[in-house]
Amino acid sequence: MTTEEKLAWLTNDFIQLLFTLKNDATGNWGVLNAQQMVEHLSDAVRQANGKVPKTLLTPSEHLEKVRSFMLSEKPFRENTKNSEMPDEPQPVRLAGMSEAIVELKQELTSFIDFYKDDGNKELMNPFFGALNFEQWTHLLHKHARHHARQFNLIQE
């Protein structure tokens, strides 16, 4: 899939799939309900659009290996642990699922706008290092597909 195709899936197809979920739907794994998952994805996009700067957490000796995985087509495993997330999910921030999806769409638009003049500028991802527009798009797509599988929105 090209970067443009991944962006189209994220900003159109995936958003439409999210509207089929009830806010309290539970996934096949993990502790987040559907609305918490969408808000979690918005948090991830805020890293990619520069609104929430991060520092690298991955030790330098492991960075090449984890970046290689991130850039591959291999999906994230079920129950992949995110060390930046608490064991117990945060309460929802927004009034409902529709508001959460609108927020995600807005953050994705901000992501595209952030890179529109220079796709080569880089922002730090805490697990995978400094990423440019194409790399962030790949990661956001991979992350969204992971959660789409979690909530039976897609089969792979």
Image (cartoon, rainbow, N blue to C red):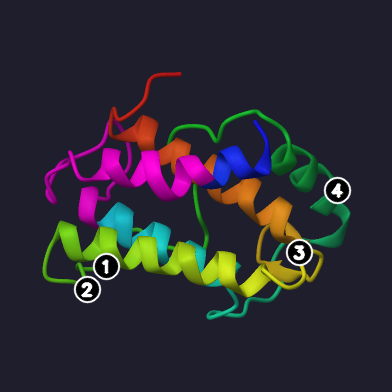
Q: CA distance from mark 1 to mark 3?
A: 33 Å
Q: From the viewer's perspective, is 48 left or right of 64?
A: left
Residue topped by disc 3: 119
Residue topped by disc 4: 64
Q: From the viewer's perspective, is 127 left or right of 38?
A: right
Q: Confirm whether the magenta stretch covers residue 40.
A: no
Of mark 2 and mark 4, the one earlier in the sequence is 4
Closer to viewer: mark 2 or mark 1: 2
Q: Secondary structure at mark 1?
A: loop
Q: Residue 97, position in %: x, y?
A: 17, 57
Q: Secondary structure at mark 4?
A: helix
Q: From the viewer's perspective, is 71 left or right of 21?
A: right
Q: CA distance from mark 2 to mark 4?
A: 35 Å
Residue topped by disc 1: 90
Which residue range is magenta in the image? 8-35
Type of amino acid under label 3: Gly
- Please report the residue visible at 76 percent of the width from the left and 64 percent of the height from the top: 119
Q: Is residue 78 above or below residue 110?
A: above
Residue topped by disc 2: 93
> Badges 2 and 3: C-beta atoms under 8 Å apart?
no
